[in-house]
Amino acid sequence: MPKLADHVVSMPRSGIREVMDAAWRMQGEVIGLHVGEPSFPTPEHIREGARKALDAGATRYVPNAGIPELREAIAQKLHARNRLEVQPEQIVVSAGGMQALHNTLALMVSAGDEVLIPDPGWPNFAMVVQLLQGQPIRYQLRSENGFQPAVQDLEALVTDRTVAVLVNSPSNPLGTVLGRKDALDLLEFANRNDLWVVSDECYDGITFDQPHLSIGSLGGEAQVVSCFSFSKTYAMTGMRVGYSVLPMELAHNAAKVQEPLISCVNAPAQWAALAALAGPQDVAEEMRKTYQDRRDAAMSVLDQQKIGYLKPEGAFYLWVDVRDRCAGDVSAWALAFLEKRRVAVAPGTAFGPAGEGWARLSLATATPDLLEGCRRLGSFDA
Ligand code: PLP
């Protein structure tokens, strides 16, 4: 057989997919708490935005960096909601937040370069760095630091190959939200070590107890790239629209890099994204409020059963402590829980070694299923 690329063959699969495949193989009903897929239909005015665009003939190539109307609307959103003062030219529209990360990291990572990524953290962070032939280096988010990045940990991991530090707030899987002091410390760390800060803010529209803070709004404009998504806030995951916000010099390169990656984002989907920003925001607020209600209801079921968890302040996940239930192998425990109690959850180790003994439950799943899944957790004895 002709040769395959080593770095792709050796790239591990997402550990969430393993549970997903096992759930799909099962006959009959399974409660799915393993994926972050909003249970809501995409709001009508957003679907209408795509339909109108199709009917108006928006089926041709558009600029690499996105349609001007959408980039203008995003710049206004960033000003109003993220306190990021940027020109539309600094925005590059991408195929979801995932491709914003890919496009951004492609500008920074040469073969062998290192990127600091959170542990636990979304599995795709390590995958995208490896796809670029870089080295993902995990920094631990520890409970004694409120699961926030600790500068002394980061400092110890920096080498002359380190090019960037990736932060994710609100965090998947932890639900933590970066505060001002930690954000300033991070900026100072990045500045001292001459590193890019890649800030994944794909859940910026979903916070509960404290507002979202964009690290780029605190300064460091020359070295912060922020990545956002329409997927979660507007329940439009399959539309695949996200964007990155970059320093001007980087933005020109990011637009150029879109050409060999995807050329441009699907045009009707971009018009749908514009409809999301231009239309009523109360639908997004209702969904956010529902996630908060689900969080509170799920926490109360877990409390009744004396199951520990980290109270999420944002995103839509609940990080549940199963250390005394899983005998040191949460991955096997999650498969057994699926098989015996018909509930799919994401094992913590899918998010890195620091996730051993923890499981992630998605609050994006409809309330009755979520609460039933939490009850079954209490009565499951592996
Ligand atoms: N970043 C994080 C932390 C995520 O959890 C996700 C999706 O689950 C994304 C980025 C990308 O989402 P999308 O590509 O659908 O915009």
Image (spheres, rainbow, N blue to C red):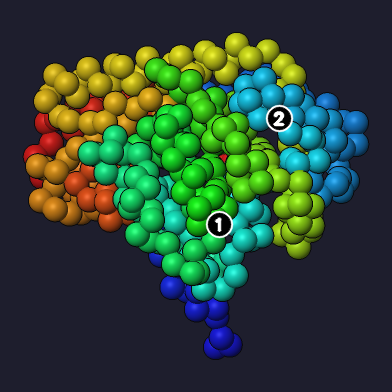
Label 1 crowd (10 A; few <14 / some 14-19 / many >=20): few
Q: Is residue 76 visible?
A: yes
In the image, what residue occupies the spot 54% across and 66% down?
Answer: 131
Q: Is residue 21 visible?
A: no
What is the three-letter code of the residue carrying label 2?
A: Glu
What is the three-letter code of the residue carrying label 1?
A: Asp
Q: Secondary structure at mark 2?
A: loop
**How far across and down, in percent of the image, does residue 236 sit?**
61, 32
Task: Give the residue number, with chain letter if any, for mark 2.
Answer: 85
Q: Is residue 84 left or right of residue 136?
A: right
Q: Secondary structure at mark 1?
A: loop
> Which label number is shown at residue 194?
1
Q: Is residue 150 left or right of residue 255?
A: left
**Figure check: 234 above or below 62:** above
**How far across and down, in percent of the image, does residue 243 sit?**
67, 41
Closer mark to the observer between disc 1 and disc 2: 1
Q: Nearer the viewer, residue 345 or 242?
A: 242
Q: Within 8 Å of ligand 1, the CB of disc 2? A: no
Q: Nearer the viewer, residue 269 or 65?
A: 65
**How far across and down, in percent of the image, does residue 194 sit?**
55, 57
**How far across and down, in percent of the image, does residue 356 sit?**
22, 50
Work out which quarter of the rendered image holds the N terminus and state it.
Answer: bottom right
In the image, what residue occupies the spot 66% across and 54% down?
Answer: 103
Tell me where residue 362 sits by quadrant.
top left
Query: How far is disc 1 from disc 2 in space, using C-alphas?
Result: 23 Å
Q: Within 8 Å of ligand 1, the CB of disc 1? A: no
> Which label number is shown at residue 309?
none
Tell me where residue 379 sits by quadrant.
top left
In the image, what residue occupies the spot 49% across and 64% down?
Answer: 162
